[in-house]
Image (cartoon, grey):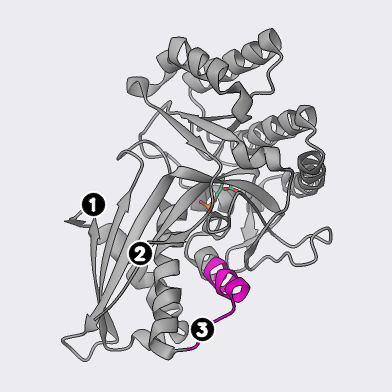
Amino acid sequence: MLKSAWECPSNIALVKYWGKYDVQKPRNPSLSFTLSESKTETSITLSEGKSDALLSTELLLEGKSNEKFKAKIDEFLKQYWSNFSYLKGKHLLIETRNSFPHSAGIASSASGMGALICCLADLEQKITGEILPENEFWRKVSFFSRLASGSACRSVFPYCAAWGRDEMLPDSSEEYAVSLPFSPIFKQYRDCILIVSAAEKSVSSRAGHALMNNNPFAELRYDLARKNFHALYAAMQNEDLKTFVKIVENEALMLHSLMMLSEPSFILMQPATLSLIEKIRDFRAETGLPVCFTLDAGPNIHLLYPQECEKEVRERVENDFVRHCEGGKVIFDRVGEGAKKL
Ligand code: PMV
């Protein structure tokens, strides 16, 4: 019996990936913070299969059988079977759990798929005996994480990652993400996730990406995203927090504007999302602190701030912002170190 166990965190995009082509290739480069507390732990135990089937799987999410996630993994392995033939005739017991609370409105597909692919890549090395150099191992993990769940490819790298080809980064690619150098202050960055709603989204990100194909603003968006990517990267090198705040909020609002201007149009923000955005901007104006917000494809707010603002932010969150969160739910997360072997 062979076993491999890994953890992989979720990530939050600062420059958003929204619109794709071919097999999960992004229309523009994106850039994200890797998180720390919001993560998935997964183990795969391999044994000999009972039948002559290609392979069999069993999936336990928090100790309970989960057919939906199992079907997703089965489909992925089948689709890319030529890359997983080392699993032929095996039975895979996949045990997975998320550190973040159930139905917290945090997408678990980036962390879940990232952790799964780490286990598979590790098992492949154990079975074939071919050990890749570390950078090639991570590139491969990121490549298959992208095929499994798009932006998951950024989650495996520490602190900050970029995905999408851009001449500014010679190693960058549409097929996998790369780790991004930046000023040390961002290693200590905090992300307080304000849960406005934990309900499942009315429009999946798969459907949202597809609607970009007919969005009249699509070409302008891809152009602006690239400009924001360059400007944000420069701001992060120079510790220019004023520009950082401006671009991060612009990206979040552009993403949601694109949703509103899709055909059919859809809105994922909720009244409490807008109240919190106003409160965060008021808080910044009052205190001069470089706090800002971003959003993923949902109503929840990611409140980003440097470590030095921790005390003031916690006070404000606990005394005020929390009232706008569903069941008072808030997750204090921070930038983290990427996927790790357990
Ligand atoms: O990776 P997907 O298909 O779930 O799309 C992610 C889309 C956003 O979260 C809105 C942006 C991003 O870059 O993560």
| Snapshot quadrant of residue 244 | top right
Q: Secondary structure at mark 1?
A: loop
Q: Secondary structure at mark 2?
A: helix
Of 66 and 211, the residue lying toward us = 66
Q: Position of residue 256 (x, y in %)?
A: 60, 34
Mark 1–mark 3 Cα distance, whole angstroms, equals: 31 Å
Mark 2 or 3, nearer chain start = 2
Q: Nearer the viewer, mark 2 or mark 3?
A: 3
Q: Is residue 292 something one can see in this rendering? A: no
Q: Which residue is mark 3?
A: 131
Q: Position of residue 334 (x, y in %)?
A: 52, 38
Q: Position of residue 141 (x, y in %)?
A: 52, 69
Is the residue at mark 2 in contact range of ligand 1, meaning its CB lies under 8 Å from it? no
Residue 98 appears left or right of 36: left
Q: What residue is drawn where x is 37% and y is 25%?
A: 329
Mark 2–mark 3 Cα distance, whole angstroms, equals: 28 Å
Of 168 and 149, the residue lying toward us = 168
Q: Is residue 115 something one can see in this rendering? A: yes
Q: Is residue 131 magenta?
A: yes
Q: Is residue 142 magenta?
A: yes
Residue 336 appears left or right of 195: right
Residue 97 appears left or right of 245: left
Mark 1–mark 2 Cα distance, whole angstroms, equals: 17 Å
Q: Nearer the viewer, mark 1 or mark 3?
A: 3
Q: Quick check: 319 above or below 232?
A: above
Q: Secondary structure at mark 3?
A: loop
Q: Which residue is mark 1?
A: 62
Q: Which residue is mark 2?
A: 72
